Image (cartoon, rainbow, N blue to C red):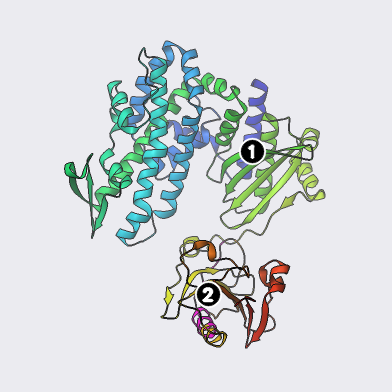
Amino acid sequence: MEEYLQKVTKNIEFYEQACGLKDRRKVLKKIKEVSKIKNDIPVFLFGIMNCLCSDNPEYYWKRDVANEIENIIEPIVKQNITKFNNSIISSSIEFFESIRAFENITNIIVELRDVSFEEGYKTKLIRNPLLNQIYEDFLMNLYRLIKNIIDAFSDKDYSNLNTLGKIIPCLKKHGFNKSTEINIDIRNAINHGNLFVKGNKIEYRFGKTPQSYEYKTINIWEYDSIINEAYDIGCGILVGFFKILSKYPEIIINHYDSSEENAKEWYRLIYKNSKIRVLYLNSVKTNNINQFNVHIETNIENKNNLIFALIELARGAFFRFPKYNSYFIGYEHNRSSSGFIRLTNEQLSSTNNISELYKMILENKDILMMPILSSEININAFKFQVFPKIKSEYYEIQNIKDCSIENFKRISATVILTKKYSKKNTRIIIDKIISELKPLKTSQNPYIETKYGEEDCDIIFINIFTHTYNRKMFNLFPSNNSFVCTAHYYKNHSCPKLTHGGVMKSLWDSYKKEKHKNIVIAWNPKF
């Protein structure tokens, strides 16, 4: 382990340089000032503790909760560290799932907090699911972790406590009062469909039976406060545990060595920073080649920096998991299409020189990397673009999507006819639909270069069906009685056409094609 930690420490230094994170000492100083941790911060916790001490909303974690966790749990550690180690190992799923929940919830908050939705819509779309995630995924896993530790050191059996209603009284009994100050009533109301939006207020009801329901009314801002409080409690519990792990780093080492699955989760945390988040790790075996896969999301803006960061991730995986034949690092980017690099065990064993490894990647063409677009593009404008609802007495247009490519603005949609019309009338309807879809405004794509804006569409794809009550009837097979036709509008001859209409050749060949103005109509042969 000592040799591994030495390798990783150097590896992390280069990795952070590639990510554009230079002043580690300054960051460490801030973490210690905010968290009041006096010991060194283990490399395993540096990234997540930096988030909890430097980023909004993470740094609002409740100090009294963190202190409560530290003050109650540390004496247990001192009492019997071996037993504590075993309880942590047996609670690995809860421990790591709570961290994943923390990351996912934080991403939702950061991404959506500045989106200006109407309050009722925002409550249904964001507030209710967010509160549920905080309670069920974040806090529940943390509470189970604490309960399992209590269970390991108690004469009583608490293993059957698996709901919030049962776990919270147990935790309170053992002194975890600050950590459990949450509103279970509003959570129960959400789960049973008993929360209602009334203007700028929320009304919810709770109780075991409708006859015993209690009703409460709160302001929207009070609901936001309940959500924030629950999130801050969860973050406080995490910080409390991390303070203990910083004092007793041997607990991490023991846990890290206990299984490959646990080692994968610690790898995720080692390489966590503001530029890269490791999503998950897995392995695949094909043709006797055993490959280790690392999947990340990143916002590194410089292409060369990204390549070198990916190489360091591959080296880090190789150091800890050396038995694999190759190491694949795949990424999702907030300003580009997804990509990857791949290095073999032999290549990683042959040199520590990053430039040489880069040359090997290029020579073997084990890289896919698309251009990274400007950071000035409004991502939310693209993510949340809403097309108008288009409906008449004859048809309804659904599932409108922007599928534009470079130099050509494209729209696709599904059309539901109110009844079966003749081919002549269907052509008239198609003309009308094309005229309604052509002027739709599209937002700039932050991932790939495409044509966008208020200019008329160059290409439109529509699949047309008659109304049905069966979801499975929206397929393009001739045997589907609801399928009428697929129609492709092309503004002029310069517009690239889909090969075989974008479907299997045999399927395309089975349709009856006709040219109608600038539109290619492929009819269901049974229509």
| Badge count | 2
Is residue 385 shown left or right of residue 295?
left
Q: Amino acid at mark 2?
A: Gly
From this viewpoint, is residue 372 visible? yes
Q: Quadrant of residue 150?
A: top left
The secondary structure type at the circle numbered 2 is loop
Who is closer to the viewer here, 168 or 311?
168
Residue 123, horizontal then vertical, whole percent: 32, 54
From this viewpoint, is residue 64 visible? no
**Which label number is shown at residue 282?**
1
Q: Quadrant of the N terminus?
A: top right
* Residue at point 33%, 45% (across, down): 191
Residue 211, horizontal then vertical, whole percent: 17, 43
* Residue at point 42%, 22% (across, down): 148
The secondary structure type at the circle numbered 1 is strand
Q: Which residues are magenta?
A: 430-446
* Residue at point 53%, 61% (across, down): 472
* Residue at point 57%, 48% (across, down): 297
Q: Report the Cα–Cα distance between label 1 and label 2.
A: 40 Å
Q: Quadrant of residue 153?
A: top left
Q: Amino acid at mark 1?
A: Asn
Residue under numbered circle 2:
453
